[in-house]
Amino acid sequence: RALGQDISVQGAMGYIDSYGRALDLRVPRGIKQQARMGTTLESPVAGRRTVFDPVRAEEIARAYEAAPVKPSAKDRRATHRSYRRFVKELEAQYNYIVDDLGIEIIVQAADPYSSPADMMRDIRDNKTLRVMSTETTGPHPHMSNRENDMFRAVHDFFGHAGLGNTFDRHGEVVAYLKHSQMFSELARGAMFSETMAQASTLIRRNGFPPQKAVLMPKRFWSNDTLFNDPS
């Protein structure tokens, strides 16, 4: 089950209300009201299942696999700008979860949950969210361990827990489409690489891909792409 109205709707939309002006955030124009990040499983859109597109995922995975671990000299400036903005917005989202919603985030060495339901139950009943540490899984080529841990927490919270979706290929699409609406377009470039690009490559390889810090082509993650996404 989803966490419910308070966390899913008031949490995500409340974040936009609280930080939107300072970060120049807004829900991308063209997103239908029933598809925005504030919807819950009880809403009319719930019956329209968002599904994984294997053709698009193959295109994304091939582009990610062909990319270097770190950006080329030509792409370095744009990549660093996107990741700087991404981290800035991550910190705002993290602070909102902890300070405004009162959720305790615990970073630990072991995988904390046996199922998505366990994670959502911990948030709902204990106001606690646990994530496996970057120190355990290996460093990110651009972000610090703390920054990557923050991302794991906020993506699990806003992308997965509020809607009650799983971590399978369909759930990862839902998580990206919902959570990506909470980022500026500049930050979404990095966010796409950390979510859909990695997930698509994981599914194609049947194993975790090397961690990279690159910008995928903008056609994958622009505002236009987001509000025209058939999912």
Image: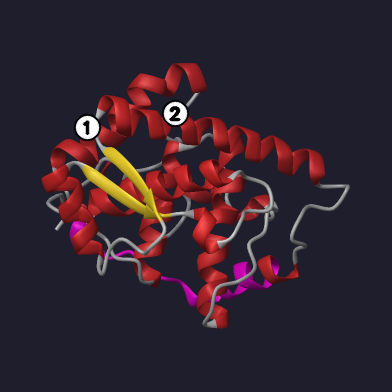
- The image shows residue 195, relative to residue 205, as above or below, that is above
| Of the pair 91 and 75, the residue shown nearer to us | 91
**Span of residues in magenta:** 46-63
Image marks 2 and 1: residues in contact by CB distance under 8 Å: no
Magenta residue check for 53: yes
Question: Which of 61 and 153 lies nearest the eye of the viewer?
Answer: 153
Q: Quadrant of residue 173?
A: bottom left
Q: Residue at x 40, y 34 (%)?
A: 94
**Residue with the mark numbered 1:** 10
Q: Position of residue 212 (x, y in %)?
A: 67, 59
Q: CA distance from mark 2 to mark 1?
A: 16 Å
Q: Which of the two discs, 2 and 1, labels the residue nearer the N terminus? A: 1
Residue 92's label in the rendered image is 2
Residue 181 place in picture, x, y as percent = 43, 41
Residue 6 in view, yes or no: yes
Which quadrant of the structure image shows residue 106? top left
Q: Amino acid at mark 2?
A: Ala
